[in-house]
Amino acid sequence: MDGRKIIHVDMDAFYASVEQRDDAALRGRPVVVAWKGARSVVCAASYEARRFGVRSAMPALRAERLCPEAVFIPPDFTRYKEVSRQMREILRRHTDLVEPLSLDEAYLDVTENKCGLPTATRVAKLIREQIREELALTASAGVAPNKFLAKIASDWRKPDGLFVVQPGEVDAFLAPLPVGRLPGVGAVTEARLGELGIARVDDIRRWTIENLEERLGRYGARLWQLAHGVDESAVVPNRPTKSISAETTFEEDISLASTGEHIAELAERVWNAARRDGRAARTVVLKLKTREFANLTRSQTLPAPLASSAELASTALALCRRVLLAPEQRYRLVGVGVSHLQ
């Protein structure tokens, strides 16, 4: 698939930026979007708060310690979803091949664009201008021959930046990058690669694909491809949802027997979300996180699609019987989900 032109658009500190846009008193101040509570985590942090080390997914209490003067705002996802819809409308002016990843980011394939602009760089510039003028927000963009390079590039000059990786620059761009910048390389994989003497992308290139597969299984082949700038994955618009879930974190750790009421409430939320999605589900998933942060999942696939929220709740509750831990075990989170959507 040579000759592709891919853009990755990523809104800057999206939730926090929407809050600052809509409340002038918040502009220039460190803003943290998070619910109050000992178990809450940060949904987003403005760049003013990030200077103090505050990051998304960080416990809210830690964020407060790092930045005592931060303004904490509870998230308003209804408002964020509406702004996200407006952002996607701007993107679709340029191509129908738009693949949203979340509320604040998306891939675009602009190999052919609706505006007839000669380069993907021009398209990315125009998109960023339109987002700024129409939404009063900023977005960063990466332009590259494939998706994973475009995503890396969009982070290169954040916030409010644009970075372009031309086809002839791919090898030079990738070579010095730490392996942790590659998709799928988390802390565990990065440590394992470190044991093999692999710290940068050019270290991977010294290995054959066969040797990497021998050490890392199927991901070894994928890693070799990424290190050589190969990513044939297409931009897929309107990708169907594979699962729907909801979860809650408790103020204090509770017993498994005490999760029943929460499971019923979560089942109702998931059922309503699935109905809005217009599809029925056959698989029910129960998720638990212990006091010690161990994650447990149990699932059951039914012979026919779920018929009601009550059936979803009863199935999720029944899955609790398959959690074979001691009765005194305490849990900090419970979640309910459905998959095999039809």
Image: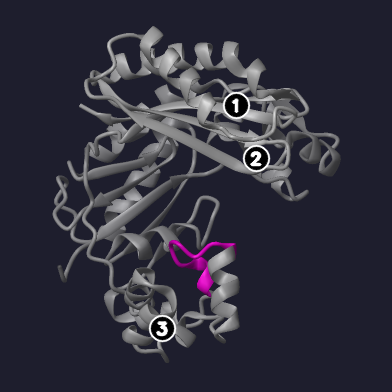
Spot occupied by residue 17 in the image (x, y as percentages of width and height):
57, 34
The relative height of residue 41 versus residue 127 in the rendered view (above or below) is above
In terms of sequence position, does the residue under pointer 3 or pointer 2 come before the other? 2
- Kindly identify the residue that appears in the image at 23 percent across and 18 percent down: 278
Asked whether residue 89 appears in the rendered view, the answer is yes
- Kindly identify the residue that appears in the image at 31 percent across and 59 percent down: 147
Q: Residues within 10 Å of mark 1 (few under 14, many from 20)?
A: many
Q: Distance from label 2 to label 1 (Cα)?
A: 9 Å
Verify whether residue 106 appears in magenta.
Answer: no
Quadrant location, the N terminus: bottom left
In terms of sequence position, does the residue under pointer 1 or pointer 3 come before the other? 1
Q: Secondary structure at mark 3?
A: helix
- Kindly identify the residue that appears in the image at 72 percent across and 32 percent down: 329
Q: Distance from label 1 to label 3 (Cα)?
A: 39 Å
Q: Nearer the viewer, residue 101 or 125?
A: 101
Question: Are the residues flagged by discs 1 and 3 in contact, CB closer than 8 Å?
Answer: no
| Residue hosting label 2 | 46
Q: Secondary structure at mark 2?
A: loop
Q: Which mark is residue 19?
A: 1
Spot occupied by residue 12 in the image (x, y as percentages of width and height):
52, 44
Q: Distance from label 3 to label 2 (Cα)?
A: 32 Å
Image: magenta residue range? 179-187
Question: Horizontally, is 263 left or right of 245 in the view?
Answer: right
Asked whether residue 42 appears in the rendered view, the answer is no
> Which callout, 1 or 3, points to the residue nearer the camera?
3
The relative height of residue 325 versus residue 79 in the rendered view (above or below) is below
| Residue hosting label 3 | 172
Amino acid type at image mark 1: Glu
Q: Nearer the viewer, residue 32 or 293?
A: 293
The relative height of residue 10 versus residue 263 in the rendered view (above or below) is below
